[in-house]
Amino acid sequence: MGKLIVWNLMSLEGYFEGPAMWDLNFRGSVWSEDLEALSAEHTTTSVALVFGRVTYEGMEAYWTSGAENGPLADAMNSLPKYVASTTLKSTTWNNSHILAAPLGESIARLKREHDGNLFVFGSAKLIHALRPLDLIDEYRIGIAPLFLGAGTPLFKPDAPPRELKLIEARTLKRDCVLMRYARA
């Protein structure tokens, strides 16, 4: 059975992007060799990627632009990608599929069909929709040592309470702290 893992970087106050959509400039303040290696590990140990529509469209634009080459770009462009959307009618990014509604059933089916890690990158709205369904197996959050002052929160405040269990905490270079939590 597959494991659904959320991976994101966020500011100390919980923003995963700045005030404007796709404002990810703060990530440069913590980017280092070990964070790059961790990102590469996530893609090489992944059997599929799961996105919300907005993140999917942004990732598609970036990874198909040729802005980056190498193993990470190859993985992003070749891995199966599943997008949760009620408005997207078709996909053009290689190996992409639109998830059928209802979302919970689609994600549960993906977890049954894939033996390995399914990663969610970005996708705050998708994460918010999945939290009450108890389908997320692990949260991997990189905490950047800064305050953005404004932005998009990774976790919305109106989700039901959920107790988690810390499985790892370690400091990466440039003072980024990786926190890994699983369901309690």
Image: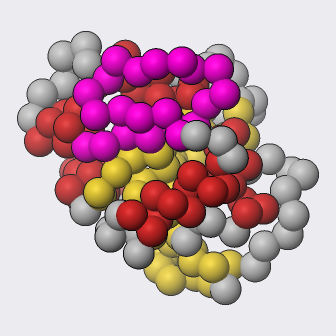
Which sits in the foreground, 80 or 152? 80
Res 93 visible: yes
Res 5 visible: no
Q: Is residue 49 above or below residue 37?
A: above
Q: Residue at x 26, y 19 (%)?
A: 64
Tell me how many marks there are: 0
Quadrant of image for the N terminus:
bottom left
Part of the protein shown in magenta: 79-99
Magenta span: chief secondary structure: loop
Q: Position of residue 25 (x, y in %)?
A: 48, 26
Q: Position of residue 75 (x, y in %)?
A: 20, 42
Q: Position of residue 51 (x, y in %)?
A: 50, 39
Which sits in the foreground, 13 or 109? 109
Q: Is residue 4 left or right of residue 33?
A: right
Q: Residue at x 85, y 56 (%)?
A: 159
Q: Is residue 98 left or right of residue 31?
A: right
Q: Position of residue 122 (x, y in %)?
A: 53, 40
Q: Is residue 165 left or right of residue 177?
A: right
Identity of the residue furthest to the left in this view: 70
Q: Residue at x 19, y 25 (%)?
A: 68
Q: Is residue 129 above or below residue 148?
A: below
Q: Is residue 144 above or below residue 153?
A: below
Q: Quadrant of residue 59?
A: top left
115 part of magenta stretch: no
User: What colour-coding does the image apply?
Assistant: secondary structure
Which sits in the foreground, 167 or 174? 167
91 part of magenta stretch: yes
Q: Residue at x 67, y 86 (%)?
A: 184
